[in-house]
Image (cartoon, rainbow, N blue to C red):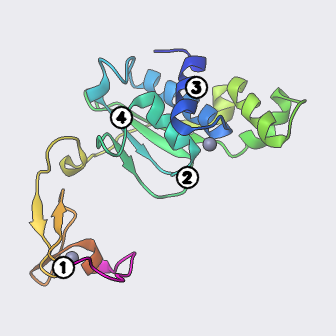
Amino acid sequence: MKDFETLLAESVTVHGHLCAGQVIGVRMSMLALQRIGIDDPRGADRKKLYVLVEIDRCATDAIQAVTGCSLGKRSMYFHDFGVMAATYVNLETGRAVRVTAREEARDLADKYCREGGDKYSRQLEAYKVMAEDELFVVQDVTVDIPAVNLPGRPLKRVQCSRCHDWVQDAREIERDGELLCRSCAFGRYYRVVATAE
Ligand SMILES: [Zn+2]
Ligand SMILES: [Zn+2]
């Protein structure tokens, strides 16, 4: 695996700025990949790796940069839980690890980095050198990943009987014998103003 500084620089390029989230995301990914036996995530091991993230914040971009996993490749899954945690799965061996960033690490920053800058830049520098067990909770876990969430061609495509949108990957809802898209089943996140002719 590449070293921390190289991975951090790559992640900053992807994310657009250096921040504490990049340091956290790179470090948690390095730790996790080592623990599940993935050495070359973007090369030889790229088809073996799957990541489930629990937050859509800075660290998620770092996780994408280090692992090469993404929503578009379907090698990343987003659980919108608002928790700074991610689970890394070796699809070949089934070995999986969930890493959570410790909230207490924020207050430990002063122990590692006393001077210079504001609280956030001191945290950023501290996270680079802080001991792994002060920064993270690490759990060995097992994860069942449904076949419809894995990379590859859609296993299923059905048409919503109300709005006629096509729904892939078994996200349709069956209700009273009717197949519905989620918008028709649960309500829309948007309001239509006009449909182009
Ligand atoms: Zn950021
Ligand atoms: Zn519909």
Q: Reading the chain from its start, which is encountered first: label 4 or label 1?
A: 4
- Distance CA(mark 2)–CA(mark 4): 18 Å
Q: Which residue is mark 4?
A: 89
Q: Closer to us: mark 4 or mark 3? A: 3
Q: Are marks 1 and 3 in contact (CB under 8 Å)?
A: no
Is residue 127 on the magenta stretch? no
Please name the amino acid that badge 3 sits on: Leu
Residue at image mark 2: 83
Judge: label 3 CB < 8 Å from ligand 1: no
Q: Magenta span has 195?
A: yes
Q: Residues within 10 Å of mark 4 (few under 14, many from 20)?
A: many
As helix, strand or loop, the secondary structure at mark 4 comes to strand
Q: Which of marks 3 and 2 precedes in the sequence?
A: 3
> Which amino acid is tagged 2?
Val
Q: Which residues are magenta?
A: 186-197
| Circle 4: residue type | Val
Q: Alpha-carbon neighbours of circle 1 within 10 Å: few (<14), some, or many (≥20)? A: few
With respect to residue 160, does 148 lie above or below? above
The numbered disc on residue 8 is: 3
Cβ–Cβ under 8 Å for marks 2 and 3: no
* Identity, as a three-letter code, of the amino acid under mark 1: Cys
The answer to whether residue 139 is visible is no
Q: From mark 2 to mark 3, how far is it between C-alphas?
A: 22 Å
